[in-house]
């Protein structure tokens, strides 16, 4: 008994100081996290079951908001469908492109620094300016795409005015700003030891074979990271459709984040907006969970 | 030493954080409306508490404070950017100079990117908004509990508003239950600007009062021609077109008391059919990327014969046309099949918050902004037609623009014929559905009747869900 308390006392001296230091050092972040993340999340969860307006005042209405969202609200259904479509188009394409460009930028080519800057530049350019620029590019009458097509005698479509094409245009637009994913991929690829490639070269493996047998498998942790981050951000798509099409034509680019924004800040339906936000959160969690569970089967860690 | 520094640094960071957060939470201590006597701020020491309920209880005579016994602080929140901000600031500075007895502070917040929406909404909800807030019956602020009823002040003043305000400019500020939510500052409606040279070259007579959009579907084709960047049109697709179209064939979007949607009526089907006809014939451009190619650019570059020109953009349009050598004139806006003018009003006004500690000073400001201070109204005239009848008729109406015979008189004479922007503010959710209906017909080639059958019930559901209908 006495030896135990002695041990406890002995441990507490170092550990106590460490604990205090630990909490002291993380306290700024922790405080912000609790006040600006945990509290708003809990508050919005409570609002999701009410008919609150912007003031946060409202009556408890049980699951009515959820029932309305899934049975009555046509815009919510359209937005969810569009968002899923966007995620399914954007995420795989972004992974393929970022891997390919990351691999290219890891090669010993001339003006490497220049190319790396060029590919990263769109990421740090103002999102609004880039979106408006793409609006001009896609313009049915004056856009450069249709101008180029007209040189070959082809009448281009009204890209952003056609509900079958508008979401695809937004995917293309977003793919242009892949700089950060490319950078992460590049770092991952550069982390692969040269000895693997040297061995492969001695064995006579071609460049393509090296990519698929060495680079790709050993980049899967980075791809996994980009996949998770890409899925989460893709589900929250807002700026591009908001600026360019405002959800149109005929709600074909309406996203869940836009429906949340409209209900919260245009219609003043805080309760309903919170309900949709939680639906989105749950869907993102499910997708992330599935991806996380699947990593055992396809992510290879070097060690 | 090193450890001490780290600890001290961490403590410093934590303390700063706590202080910052405490600062953020300062709004909690904002005084509530129901227990905030005006005297707390040193305001009107001879007056009764002046929040909404108090103004009603104490009788109208107390509410009718004259400027001579005002005092205390008055915080004013306005929106605006560029010329609008200058106009607002100019008027506010005049008020400040003329009321040294008041400690007036003001903030002008841009509306772009929903900055105003977010700041004003948060402030109103948390009770930390200004004493006086900018509002608009077609944009933001109607049918809420945030503002006091101004009827007692109007009654106490005993002024016949018809004598001092431009016709029709205050109508939109009354809720369906009669509460006067705000007081007008300015409003803008539209005049049809036309390209004189295009009309002469086409041999088409300039439209006269009573012309309809159905007429345009016939003679407007004369202007439709060319290809690509050289394509010409009869009428520019100004953003206001979508808000004009519910009225185009004699319909209305909803009943006057806002209780029932009328978007399922045959007139709406006719309007959508007509809109599509105008686009299909090339009279109105089928340009969905309105944000990249402004309709104004098409008009002032000589590619559109007509352009619905809002009072807020007359200077820009006339200057741009002049720079490009385009001779323009003004003609009446179109009418519906019943002969009623199709014109839409966008209004801006002020309201006094229920949390205001100095509503009497607020009323003085509202009154002077609306009709009782000609110099303030002249500043307001930079951004649109002031509600001040005298200034609107004698000063604003006489402002001329580059081009022959162009002035503001049409706006003054026709403001009384306008419909308030049908889908602003509280009704925005219905407006978004109406936009989807238009896109379904114009862009997706869906049958107008089928579109109305599909979407009108959604708008009806929205109407039944609005707070003022429950």
Image (cartoon, rainbow, N blue to C red):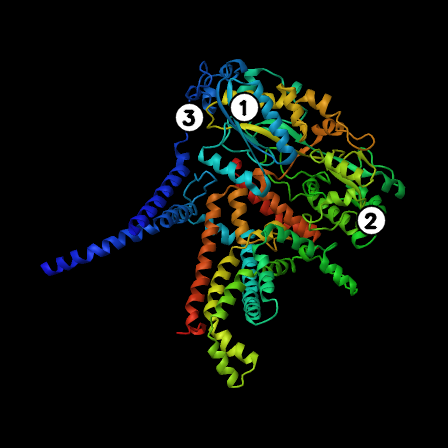
* Residue holding disc 2: B224
On the same chain, marks 2 and 3? The answer is yes
User: In the figure, is residue A292 to the left or right of B80?
Assistant: left
Q: Are marks 3 and 1 in contact (CB under 8 Å)?
A: no
Q: Disc 2 sits on a residue from what chain?
A: B
Instruction: For mark 1, give the secondary structure.
Output: loop
User: In the figure, is residue A23 to the left or right of A10?
Assistant: right
Q: Position of residue B259 (x, y in %)?
A: 57, 36
Q: Are marks 2 and 1 in contact (CB under 8 Å)?
A: no
Residue neighbourhood size for the residue with mark 2, other residues' Cα within 10 Å, grouped as few (<14), some (14–19), many (≥20): many
The extreme bottom residue here reads A203
Tell me the quadrant of the picture where the N terminus of chain A can be found: bottom left
On the same chain, marks 2 and 1? The answer is yes
Q: Disc 1 sits on a residue from what chain?
A: B
**Sequence-first tag of 2 and 1:** 1
* Residue holding disc 3: B34
Residue neighbourhood size for the residue with mark 3, other residues' Cα within 10 Å, grouped as few (<14), some (14–19), many (≥20): some
Q: Position of residue A194 (x, y in %)?
A: 48, 76
**Sequence-first tag of 2 and 3:** 3
Q: Nearer the viewer, residue B344 or B191?
A: B191
Q: Nearer the viewer, residue B48 or B445?
A: B48
**Sequence-first tag of 3 and 1:** 3
- Please determine whether, in this image, residue B355 is positioned above or below residue A199: above
Residue neighbourhood size for the residue with mark 1, other residues' Cα within 10 Å, grouped as few (<14), some (14–19), many (≥20): many
- What distance separates the C-alpha of mark 3 from that of mark 1? 17 Å
Q: Residue at x 51, y 53 (%)?
A: A71
The image quadrant that residue A293 belongs to is: bottom left
Q: Position of residue A106 (x, y in %)?
A: 54, 70
- Please determine whether, in this image, residue B59 is positioned above or below residue A241: above
Q: Residue at x 65, y 23 (%)?
A: B377
* Residue holding disc 1: B150
Whether residue A112 is visible here, answered yes or no, is yes
């Amino acid at each position: 008994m006495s030896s135990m308390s002695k041990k406890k006392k002995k441990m507490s001296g170092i550990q106590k100081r460490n604990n205090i230091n630990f909490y002291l050092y993380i306290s700024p972040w922790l405080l912000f996290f609790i006040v600006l993340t945990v509290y708003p999340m809990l508050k919005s969860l409570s609002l999701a079951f009410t008919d609150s307006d912007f003031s946060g005042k409202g009556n408890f209405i049980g699951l009515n908001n959820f029932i309305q969202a899934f049975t009555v609200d046509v815009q919510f259904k359209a937005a969810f469908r569009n968002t899923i479509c966007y995620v399914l188009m954007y995420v795989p394409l972004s992974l393929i492109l970022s891997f390919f460009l990351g691999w290219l930028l890891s090669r010993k080519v001339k003006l490497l620094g220049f190319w790396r800057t060029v590919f990263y530049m769109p990421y740090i350019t103002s999102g609004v300016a880039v979106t408006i620029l793409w609006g001009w590019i896609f313009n049915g009458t004056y856009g450069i795409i249709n101008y180029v097509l007209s040189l070959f005698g082809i009448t281009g479509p009204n890209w952003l005015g056609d509900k079958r094409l508008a979401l695809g245009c937004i995917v293309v637009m977003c793919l242009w700003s892949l700089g950060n994913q490319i950078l992460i991929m590049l770092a991952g690829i550069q982390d692969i030891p040269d000895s693997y490639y040297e061995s492969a070269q001695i064995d006579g493996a071609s460049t393509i074979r090296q990519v698929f047998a060495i680079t790709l498998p050993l980049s899967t942790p980075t791809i996994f990271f980009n996949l998770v981050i890409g899925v989460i951000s893709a589900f929250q798509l807002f700026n591009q459709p908001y600026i360019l099409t405002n959800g149109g034509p005929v709600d074909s680019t309406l996203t869940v984040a836009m429906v949340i924004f409209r209900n919260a800040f245009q219609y003043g339906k805080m309760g309903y907006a919170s309900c949709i936000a939680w639906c989105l959160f749950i869907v993102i969690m499910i997708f992330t969970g599935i991806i996380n569970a699947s990593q055992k089967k396809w992510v290879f860690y070097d060690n | 030493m090193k450890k001490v520094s780290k600890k001290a640094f961490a403590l410093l960071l934590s303390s700063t954080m706590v202080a910052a957060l405490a600062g953020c939470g300062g709004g909690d201590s904002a005084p509530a409306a129901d227990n905030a006597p005006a005297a707390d701020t040193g305001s009107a020491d001879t007056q009764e508490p002046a929040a909404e309920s108090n103004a009603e209880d104490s009788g109208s005579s107390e509410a009718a404070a004259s400027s001579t016994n005002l005092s205390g602080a008055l915080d004013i929140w306005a929106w605006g950017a560029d010329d609008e901000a200058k106009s607002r600031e100019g008027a506010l500075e005049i008020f400040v100079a003329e009321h040294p007895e008041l400690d007036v502070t003001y903030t002008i917040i841009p509306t772009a990117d929903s900055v105003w929406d977010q700041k004003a909404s948060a402030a109103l909800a948390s009770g930390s908004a200004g004493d006086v807030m900018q509002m608009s019956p077609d944009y933001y602020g109607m049918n809420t509990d945030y503002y006091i009823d101004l009827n007692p002040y109007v009654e106490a003043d005993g002024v016949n508003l018809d004598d001092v305000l431009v016709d029709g400019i205050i109508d939109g500020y009354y809720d369906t239950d009669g509460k006067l939510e705000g007081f007008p500052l300015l409003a803008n409606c539209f005049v049809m600007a036309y390209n004189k040279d295009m009309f002469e070259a086409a041999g088409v007579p300039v439209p006269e009062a009573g012309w309809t959009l159905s007429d345009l579907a016939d003679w407007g084709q004369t202007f439709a021609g060319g290809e690509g960047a050289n394509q010409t049109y009869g009428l520019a697709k100004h953003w206001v077109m979508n808000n004009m179209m519910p009225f185009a064939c004699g319909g209305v979007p909803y009943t006057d008391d806002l209780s029932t949607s009328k978007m399922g009526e045959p007139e709406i089907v006719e309007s959508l059919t007509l809109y599509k006809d105008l686009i299909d014939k090339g009279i109105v451009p089928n340009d969905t990327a309105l944000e990249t190619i402004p309709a104004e650019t098409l008009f002032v570059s000589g590619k559109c014969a007509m352009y619905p020109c809002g009072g807020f953009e007359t200077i820009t349009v006339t200057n741009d046309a002049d720079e490009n050598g385009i001779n323009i004139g003004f003609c009446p806006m179109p009418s519906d099949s019943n002969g009623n003018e199709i014109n839409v009003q966008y209004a801006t006004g002020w309201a006094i918050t229920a949390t205001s500690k100095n509503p009497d000073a607020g009323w003085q400001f509202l009154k002077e902004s609306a009709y009782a201070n000609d110099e303030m109204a002249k500043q307001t005239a930079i951004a649109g037609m002031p509600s001040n009848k005298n200034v609107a008729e004698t000063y604003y109406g006489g402002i001329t623009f580059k081009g022959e015979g162009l002035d503001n008189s049409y706006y003054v004479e026709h403001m009384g014929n306008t419909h308030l922007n049908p889908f602003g503010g509280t009704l925005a959710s219905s407006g978004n559905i109406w936009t989807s209906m238009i896109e379904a017909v114009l862009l997706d080639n869906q049958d107008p009747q089928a579109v109305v059958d599909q979407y009108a019930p959604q708008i009806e559901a929205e109407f039944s869900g609005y707070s003022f209908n429950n």
